[in-house]
Amino acid sequence: MSCKKVPVWVRVWLCILLLHFIANGIARAEDDDSAGERLFRLHCSECHGLDGQGGRGPDLTRGLYRHGSTDQALYQTISQGVTGTPMPATSLSDRQLFQIVKYVRGLASSAREVVSGDAAAGGRLFAGKGGCPKCHMVRGEGGRLGPDLTYIGSLRAPANLRASILRPVEEIDPAYWAVEAVDKDGKIYSGIRLNEDSYSIQLLDVDENLYSLTKKDLQTLTVDKKKSRMPAYAGVFTARELDDLVAYLYTLQRNARLP
């Protein structure tokens, strides 16, 4: 039977059926993991890493989420952001948001990494040779010039921890940008920026003294987004010591005992 003899209504019905299958195929493609992965890499990877193992944002491969672990809680965090952190709100559709949630769930299903190194020895290096408690706090003890590391093992993957030790300038949280100010009397203030607005700046100096300075009373003010107060430890630790230190930091998790 030639196409010319096929009734018009049959041809219309076949076209509708074909469009239906195409639409369903597109919908299924958008619902699969690759859609969530594409969205994650486009909107989330800058802070959480291409594989979700962390960077400026937390490691998402652990299944541990500070602001709730239900699908709805993850949805809320992604859609509304987190006040006081670099996590922004988003205008993505509900469907796209849940595709990201599904993808993040898949990331969290991966097994926890096994790292080489002696965590107990790493703890001694942290407190001794590294001098880390001068700037970093763990369980309420230590300094405030660097990030609190109490739960850093829940937030960062071993590779990210290692990079932060060797090359701290690669990722600098805005809360720890280096600042230097000189007032009208020539007094120099040097430390980290805690807060800043159009008229004033609050900083914590290297001795952990808190200052609130009015900008109009300053001769100069320099905020360096590319300078880290943390020194680079490349060449300071041996390869084995570095493994030990990373192993120790990786044990610092929620509901985990210190070694």
Image: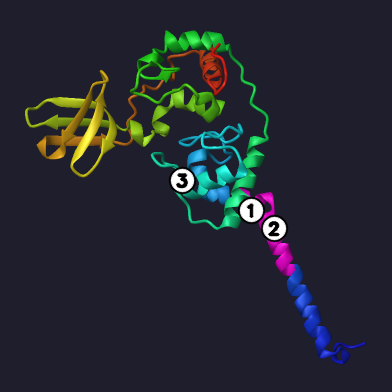
Q: Quadrant of the N terminus?
A: bottom right
Q: Is residue 11 above or below residue 149?
A: below
Horizontally, is 210 left or right of 237 in the view?
Answer: left
Residue with the mark numbered 2: 29
Mark sitting on residue 176: none
| Residue at left offset 21%, top offset 30% | 180
Mostly what secondary structure, the magenta segment? Answer: helix
Horizontally, is 253 left or right of 167 in the view?
Answer: right
Identify the mark nearer the N-term, 1 or 3: 1
Q: Secondary structure at mark 2?
A: helix
The x and y percentages for residue 104 are 61, 42
Horizontally, is 117 left or right of 89 in the view?
Answer: right
Which span is picked out in magenta? 22-37
Residue 110: name its quadrant: top right
**Eye-nearest disc, 1 or 3:** 3
Identify the mark nearer the N-term, 2 or 1: 2
User: Among all residues in the image, which is located at the extreme bottom?
Assistant: 5
Amino acid bearing label 3: Gly
Q: Are marks 2 and 3 in contact (CB under 8 Å)?
A: no
Residue with the mark numbered 1: 35
Mark sitting on residue 81: 3
**Eye-nearest disc, 2 or 3:** 3
Q: Are marks 1 and 3 in contact (CB under 8 Å)?
A: no
Q: CA distance from mark 1 to mark 3?
A: 21 Å
Amino acid bearing label 1: Ala
Q: Are marks 2 and 1 in contact (CB under 8 Å)?
A: yes
The x and y percentages for residue 97 are 57, 52
Q: Is residue 36 visible?
A: yes
Amino acid bearing label 2: Ala
Q: Secondary structure at mark 1?
A: helix
